[in-house]
Image (tube, grey):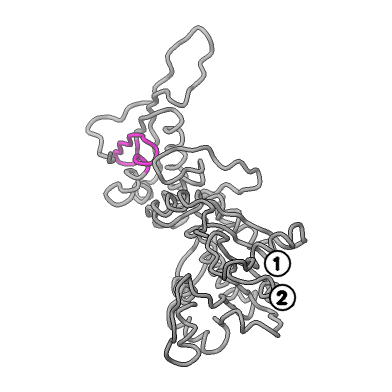
Amino acid sequence: MTARSISSAPPRESTPPRESAPHRESANEHRRMVVEFEDNRLAAITFGQHDHNLARIEQKLGVVLINRGNRVAIEGGAEAANMAKRVLGDLYDLAKKGHEIDLGDVDGVLRMNEGTLLTGDVKPARKSTSTPKVNGETAEHLKITTRNRVVVPRSPGQADYVEKLKNNLMVFGVGPAGTGKTYLAIAMAVSRMLAGEVDRLILSRPAVEAGESLGFLPGDLKDKVDPYMRPLYDALYDMMPAEQVEKRIASGQIEIAPLAYMRGRTLSDAFVILDEAQNTTSMQMKMFLTRFGENSRMVICGDPSQVDLPRGTRSGLRHALDILRGVDSIAVTRFTQRDVVRHPLVARIVDAYGDDDGR
C-alpha cells in the first residue's frame, strides 16, 4: 500500500455515530482525519522523496495516507490513525530542526511513539515512566552533535541510554546486536572530545575470536589487532572526516587498543569505551573498571547472549552487573529487540533466538 496524491478535496475528519450513551472510541473503529502543515517545503521533507515516508507509515500502521500539497488525509482504525497523526507531527518537528528525514527516522519515531516493532504490528509501548519521549521538540537535549552528523535516539531504549550517558560517570549498555550501544557511545565520546570536555578518546575490545580460529595473522602488532577493532574505526569514520580521525590517532588523542593494553594504567581526562564486554573474564572486567581516573567517563557495551569465552568461563559483564547493582554514579540501560535499529529482519532474528546462545 503506497501513499498517493489526492484527486479531489481531502476528506474532513468524521464524527462518531450518534448513540444514546456517551461514545467511547475503540481501537478498531474506522476514522478519517486531515493533518495540515504550515510550510510546504517542510511538509515535502516530512513526506519523503516520492512519498516514501508516508508509504512506510502506511505499511507499519495499516492506515491509508493521501497527500495533497501540505495536507495529508488519514484513514484507518482509530488507534492507528491517531498514531499516524502523532508520527507525522513528530517528523515535521524534526524537519523544522533541519533534519533530512529518511526511513530510519520514520522507524525511530514510530518506535518512540508506541514501542512499535518493525513487523507491521502495533504493540503497546514500553511501560516506563523514566524513559524520555523523543520527538522534534523534546529531542534537543538528547541529540549528539559530531563533525559529520547529528545523532538522535531512535528508540525508547536509545533515549534512556543517551540520557544516562549524559548524566552518569559510568554506563553499561546491555542488549542484542543492532541496538546502537557502541555507536551511540562513540558518538557521545566524539562530541565530548570536540567540545573539549575530555582530552582523549580510548576505545577497547577483548581480542576474542567469534567461535572460529583465525590462525596466524601477518604484519606488525597493529596489523594483528586491527581486524578485532574494525567496528570501532567504522563508527569513528561515521562521526568525523577520515583525515581528522587519522590525525588524532597519530597524535594519541584517539587510542584504539585491545583490552590487555589497559593493565597498569590510570585513564584520566578521557572518555573510555569497552566494546564486546561479554567476552571479558571477571578479572579482566575488574581490571578495566579500576582504570577509571579523574575527569573521565566510561561506557561498557555488550550482549550477554553472544559470549565467545571458553565453555565454563563466566562472563565478566554478567558478573559486573550483579556486583555493581545499586552503586552510585553507575547506570545500566538494558536494550531489547524493540530497540534494534538495523534492518527489520534483525529484530525478528533477535526475537527468535531470545536468550539462546547456542551452548
Question: Dividing the image into 4 quarters, which one contains the N terminus?
Answer: top left
User: Quick check: marks 2 and 1 in contact, CB under 8 Å?
Assistant: yes
- Asked if residue 320 lies left or right of residue 257, the reply is right
Q: Residue at x 56, y 54 (%)?
A: 335
Q: CA distance from mark 2 to mark 1?
A: 10 Å
Answer few, some or many: residues within 10 Å of disc 2's Cα (few below 14, many 20 plus, some between 14 and 19). many
Q: Which mark is residue 169?
A: 1
Residue 269 higher or lower than 333, as above or below: below
Depth check: 185 or 177 in front? 177
Place of residue 206 in the rendered image (x, y in percent of width and height, measured from the top left):
57, 76
The picture quadrant where one finds residue 299 is: bottom right
> Of the residues under marks 2 and 1, which one precedes in the sequence?
1
Place of residue 141 in the rendered image (x, y in percent of width and height, measured from the top left):
59, 57
Viewer-side label of 2, 1: 2
Q: Residue at x 59, y 68 (%)?
A: 277
Q: Amino acid at mark 2?
A: Phe
Secondary element type, mark 1: loop
Place of residue 53 in the rendered image (x, y in percent of width and height, measured from the top left):
35, 47
Q: Residue furthest top?
A: 20
Q: Residue furthest left?
A: 7
Residue 121 higher or lower than 174, as above or below: above
Q: Which mark is residue 61?
A: none
Q: Amino acid at mark 1?
A: Leu
Secondary element type, mark 2: loop
Q: Which residue is mark 2?
A: 292
Depth check: 259 or 167 in front? 259
Residue 15 higher or lower than 119, as above or below: above
Q: Which residues are magenta?
A: 57-72
Q: Residue at x 45, y 37 (%)?
A: 122
